[in-house]
Image: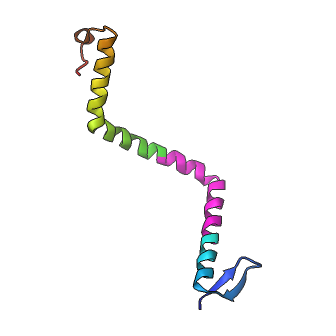
């Protein structure tokens, strides 16, 4: 049987496998909550947003959604009666 620090007074006790899993889950939940409440979590969100946003935008610009966006833009402009050739650099 493994030993674990049981949260009830944090005594070192022999525990069953199920009790060990419960203690591990409890500790993990507490560690996650402490991290999210701390000052580092806001900075982490900013860093992830700065790194991930350009990657997602680049993937969308190259993927099949880009073709759909071009067609949608063309359809909207044509339905508004805008002459696409007068826009110059626009290429649907």
Residue at the spot 73% in from the left edge and 79% down from the top edge? 10
Residue 40 place in picture, x, y as percent: 60, 54
Q: In this view, does 86 lie to the left or right of 50?
A: left
Residue at the spot 33% in from the left edge and 17% down from the top edge? 76
Residue 80 place in picture, x, y as percent: 34, 10
Residue 25 place in picture, x, y as percent: 60, 71
Which secondary structure dominates the residues rendered in magenta?
A: helix
Total count of labels: 0
Residue 42 place in picture, x, y as percent: 59, 48
Q: Residue furthest bottom?
A: 1
- Quadrant containing the N terminus in the rendered view: bottom right
Q: Is residue 39 magenta?
A: yes
Q: Give the range drawn in magenta.
A: 27-48
Q: Vertical placement of 87 versus 31: above or below?
A: above
Q: In this view, does 64 lie to the left or right of 35?
A: left
Nearest the eye: 33 or 19:
19
Q: Quadrant of residue 26?
A: bottom right
Q: Residue furthest right?
A: 9
- Quadrant containing the C terminus in the rendered view: top left
Nearest the eye: 73 or 88:
73
Residue at the spot 24% in from the left edge and 13% down from the top edge? 88
Whether residue 38 is visible, yes or no, is: no
Q: Is residue 89 magenta?
A: no
């Amino acid at each position: 049987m493994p030993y674990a620090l049981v949260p009830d007074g944090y005594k070192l006790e022999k525990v069953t496998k199920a009790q060990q899993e419960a203690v591990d889950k409890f500790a993990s939940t507490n560690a996650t909550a402490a991290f999210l409440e701390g000052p580092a979590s806001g900075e982490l969100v900013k860093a992830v947003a700065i790194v991930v946003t350009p990657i997602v935008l680049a993937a969308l610009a190259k993927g099949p959604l880009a073709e759909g966006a071009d067609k949608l833009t063309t359809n909207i402009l044509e339905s508004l009666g805008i002459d696409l050739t007068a826009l110059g650099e626009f290429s649907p």
